[in-house]
Image: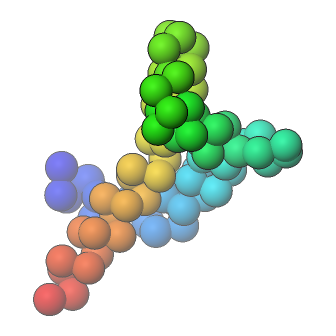
Amino acid sequence: MARLLDAVPLWLALLPAVTVGLSPFLPEPHLWEKLRMLSAGELRRGIDIFDLALHGAPWLLLLAKLGRMALRRR
């Protein structure tokens, strides 16, 4: 897994996080809406859980890539 993260260029992890992770941009990003629903305990429907996973996965990849980069610098 670590070798795979090392092989992914940073721009390739950043691009989907900004585009898919924040789309649709208006009236508010889906990820933000789903995180608010999750914190309020309203995330119950399957489509909402799927939306959270779809829009959150690019951010998890970006965080994993940045974390791996930080560990490699030490």
Residue drawn at 85 percent across, 45 percent down: 26
Q: Quadrant of the C terminus?
A: bottom left
Q: Position of residue 35 (x, y in %)?
A: 52, 40
The colouring scheme, among rainbow, by chain, secondary structure or one colour, is: rainbow
Query: In the drawing, does residue 26 fall left or right of residue 59?
Result: right
Relative to 21, is 63 on the left or the right? Answer: left
Relative image position of residue 37 (x, y in whole percent): 56, 32
Between 39 and 20, the one nearer to me in the picture: 39
Question: Relative to 42, does residue 71 appear above or below in the rendering?
Answer: below
Is there any visible trace of residue 54 in the rendered image?
Answer: no
Residue furthest top in the image: 46
Residue 43 seen: yes
The one nearer the camera, 32 or 74, is: 32
Question: Farthest residue toward the front?
Answer: 40
Q: Nearer the viewer, residue 73 or 41?
A: 41
Q: Residue at x 49, y 47 (%)?
A: 58
Q: Residue furthest bottom?
A: 74
Q: Quadrant of residue 72?
A: bottom left
Q: Is residue 41 above or below residue 36?
A: above
* Along the viewing direction, whichever of 55 and 68 lies nearer the viewer: 55
Up the image or down, 38 lies above or below 21; here it is above
Residue at (47%, 52%) from the top-left corner?
59
Q: Residue furthest right?
A: 26
Residue at left 77%, top 45%?
28
- Figure label count: 0
Q: In the rendering, at what x and y percent does residue 65 appear?
A: 34, 63
